[in-house]
């Protein structure tokens, strides 16, 4: 990871108190999202230098908390976002994910593909909402927003 690529995440930590045990499918999606996010992301807090950051995500009192630290663990900024704008899309995503995981076990490839297309569409919508909510706070690209939405969904699973 080089400095010239701009601000980026080198670690993502989900608050253990904010999540509960979920299905193996959700646990797998969460692990993959964290891995992919760390491997390739654009994450630049507005007004801060382009450097490596650590993101701690949590849900506190129905608010999504983005605690951003430098590589040494020093907090540089915290953003608290209302979960209200994400509630509907998270519920929709949960329903379609349940359908998708069930289809993987019991449906034809064409049925799975149709459900997956719907799932991706809802996922993209959630990522776009997250980008909007972070506007003026943290600049992220679409791939980073998609992976962050997966983690927000994982956190919201408990709430």
Image (cartoon, rainbow, N blue to C red):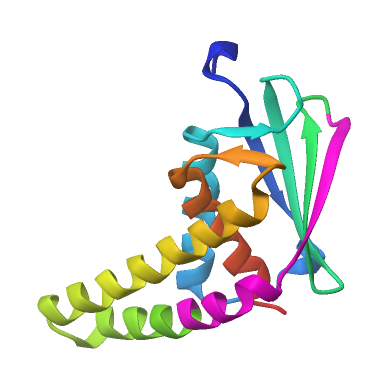
Q: Quadrant of residue 129?
A: bottom right
**72 over 134 or under it: above or below:** above
Question: In front here: 70 or 20?
Answer: 70
Report the quarter where the N terminus lies. top right
**44 over 133 or under it: above or below:** above
Magenta residue span: 73-93
Instruction: Answer yes or no: is residue 21 visible.
Output: no
Q: Is residue 55 left or right of residue 24?
A: right
Residue 41: where, in percent of width, then height?
A: 51, 35
Question: In front here: 32 or 46?
Answer: 46
Instruction: Answer yes or no: is residue 83 visible.
Output: yes
Q: How many marks?
A: 0
Q: Quadrant of residue 45?
A: top right
Q: Residue at x 11, y 77 (%)?
A: 110
Q: Is 8 included in the stretch rendered in magenta?
A: no
Q: Is residue 101 left or right of residue 155?
A: left
Q: Is 91 included in the stretch rendered in magenta?
A: yes
Q: Residue at x 27, y 71 (%)?
A: 116
Residue 49: where, in percent of width, then height?
A: 73, 19
Q: Residue at x 18, y 86 (%)?
A: 107
**8 over 137 or under it: above or below:** above
Q: Residue at x 47, y 61 (%)?
A: 29
Q: Is residue 104 left or right of residue 74?
A: left
Q: Quadrant of residue 103?
A: bottom left
Residue 127: where, in percent of width, then height?
A: 50, 58
Q: Is residue 141 left or right of residue 53?
A: left
Report the quarter where the C terminus lies. bottom right
Residue 114: where, in percent of width, then height?
A: 20, 77
């Amino acid at each position: 990871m080089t400095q010239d690529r701009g601000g980026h995440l080198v670690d993502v930590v989900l608050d253990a108190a904010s999540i509960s045990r979920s299905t193996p499918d959700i646990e797998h999606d969460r692990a993959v999202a964290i891995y992919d996010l760390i491997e390739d992301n654009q994450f630049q807090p507005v007004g801060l230098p382009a450097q490596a950051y650590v993101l701690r995500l949590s849900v506190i009192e129905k608010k999504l908390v983005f605690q951003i630290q430098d590589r040494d663990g020093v907090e540089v900024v915290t953003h608290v976002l209302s979960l209200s704008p994400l509630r509907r899309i998270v519920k929709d995503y949960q329903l379609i994910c349940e359908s998708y995981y069930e289809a993987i076990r019991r449906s034809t490839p064409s049925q799975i593909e149709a459900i997956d297309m719907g799932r991706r569409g809802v996922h993209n919508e959630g990522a776009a909402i997250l980008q909007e909510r972070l506007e003026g706070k943290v600049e992220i690209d679409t791939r980073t927003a998609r992976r962050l939405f997966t983690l927000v969904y994982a956190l919201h699973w408990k709430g």
